[in-house]
Image: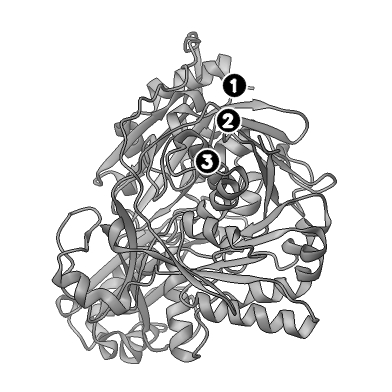
Amino acid sequence: MADPIRIANCSGFFGDRLSAAREMVEGGPIDVLTGDWLAELTMLILARTRMKRPGGGHARTFVAQMEQVMGTCLDKGIKVVSNAGGLDPDGCADAVAEVASKLGLNPKIAYVRGDDLLPRMSELMAADQIHHFETGEPIKDASSFLTANAYLGCWGIVEALNQGADIVVTGRTTDAAVVCGPAAWHHGWSRTDWNALAGAVTAGHVIECGTQATGGNYSFFTEVPGMSRVGFPWAEIAADGSTVIGKHEGTGGAVSIGTVTSQLLYEIGGPEYFGPDVTTRFDTIQLEEDGPDRVRMFGIQGEPPPSTLKVCINRPGGFRQDLNVCLTGLDVEAKAKLVEDAFWAACPIPREDFASVTTRLVRTDKEDPASNEEATAFFKMTLKDPDEQKVGRAVSNAMIELALSSIPGFTSVGGGPGGGRAFGVYVPARIPSASVPQEVVVLGGETRSVSSVIPEASVQVSPAPEPDAPAPGGPTRRAPLGAVVGCRSGDKGGNANLGVFARSDGAWAWIDTFLTTERVRELLPEAAALPIDRYRLPALRSLNFVLHGLLEEGVAASTRQDGQAKSLGEWLRARVVEIPEALLP
């Protein structure tokens, strides 16, 4: 049985800390360096970059990091696995090879392709192979698509490592695949080692967002030391898939049951976490402290995955104009109404001629304000239309022209008038796994095909034991919900997820009863009319809610101030409710 493999993360998103790769390679022992550069929005960004600059479809920051650490990685035998290839994995591999040549190094570089379905869309649609992920309706028109990429699993990465690759670059894989692949390669797992694979997927899910596992974006951040410079995490994965999450000694932040639980709740749905390699059962995950800044995850069980792969499609959504006006002092609602009425009187295009009009009154003002800022609320309007001219300069002029003729204290936010800006729409789809073979290319060597099909099987799963402590009774008092629970929230296409976790069995028993779907609607009025799913994860003392449609047509199209729902959980924690005094500090 092989020793555990330690896999380190150095990137949680496209734009993360550039020095992280060097920190992880030089800061302590690791076997593999990974990072996640891709998100649904990132694929759209890369598509636009590639349109402006040929060859710009990959994450150039990864190439810069390789220049910093490639020599050390080769000296120490550290493998590198990254999805920084984005829309152009072959171009990314070539760029890394150029860096190697410049440094006088000779690593074996491989890349995995096959995820890009855009060139194949006509044949796939003709064969009725690609359908909308949620509705099941066939995708019939791809003429305007900017990207169409299937989420590949880990087996192309495994093959590249089997061929001796030192550096593996992929396109759109799942976030966890860059961790699961090296673990499966190191331990020699088969495609039916469901529990081991599920453990590695869980490890990948925890570390894929970098410092979110070590204190970043953590509700109880005031309890975490060294938050001014948080260290990145690693996952030490054993042959059975059990994992210790940790970080290098002397780095900021913390690894605790709280930080790990928080990240486990990030951007998930129900207890069944579907992936291309395995369906990981989050209701089987158990956690225990394993020493300072060490948390062990164990007991994780898996099932065969669906026979389809998820596909991320981005298409142009049209153009938008975002208009923001400050409303200061008294009569805020009357001021908002006057601004809106005066705008439509001045606008050269009738309201009904726009494809979409969204307005919001954001009450950030305070009673008896001590500063000009505390006296200010905001009126926000977003206009959308396929016609760029409709949301162009004439529309923004119509708002600016109200400056001296409408409300007292008129101040616009965002500079002077300007044209509309393009936005994209995210379309989730699915395709049979058999239709998306992976291709592993070794630079200067051979190309091999790897099937994405996973065998079917019947597997029995037993959820982890539930805490059995009763909810405390006795008197209650009004306090912020966040005094008792933490949250982690994020985007899932046009939906948002809202994970809520307690830190004691008694608090879990109370929140499990208290925080119903209807209570969420009351506490978050913005979601009152939306379909909401509620899922229980008792062994993690957690609930997860999926708010359907909160982000409209995806992050790039959302008209919310927080278009990615990253702060949704902190809003919920700020709501004041009746809490048992026994749970309060």
The amino acid type of the residue labelled 1 equals: Leu
Q: Earlier in the sequence, mark 3 or mark 2?
A: 3
According to the image, label 3 marks what residue?
A: 202
- Above or below — where is 392 with respect to 159? below
Q: Amino acid at mark 3?
A: Thr
Q: Quadrant of residue 445?
A: bottom right
Pick the quarter of the image with the N terminus.
top right
**Residue 42: x and y, percent?**
47, 69
Q: Is any atom of residue 441 visible in this view?
A: yes
Category of crowding for the residue at label 1, using alpha-carbon neighbours closer than 10 angstroms: few (below 14), some (14–19), many (at least 20): few
Residue at screen point 40% across, 64% down:
555
Q: Is residue 318 left or right of residue 166?
A: left
Circles 3 and 2: CB distance less than 8 Å? no
Q: Residues within 10 Å of mark 3 (few under 14, many from 20)?
A: many
Q: Are marks 2 and 1 in contact (CB under 8 Å)?
A: yes
Q: Residue at x 71, y 38 (%)?
A: 3
Q: Which mark is residue 483?
A: 2
Residue 488: mark: none
Which circle's residue, 3 or 1, is located before the other in the chain? 3
Pointer 1 residue: 584
Q: Report the Cα–Cα distance between label 2 and label 1.
A: 7 Å
- For residue 229, above or below residue 256: below
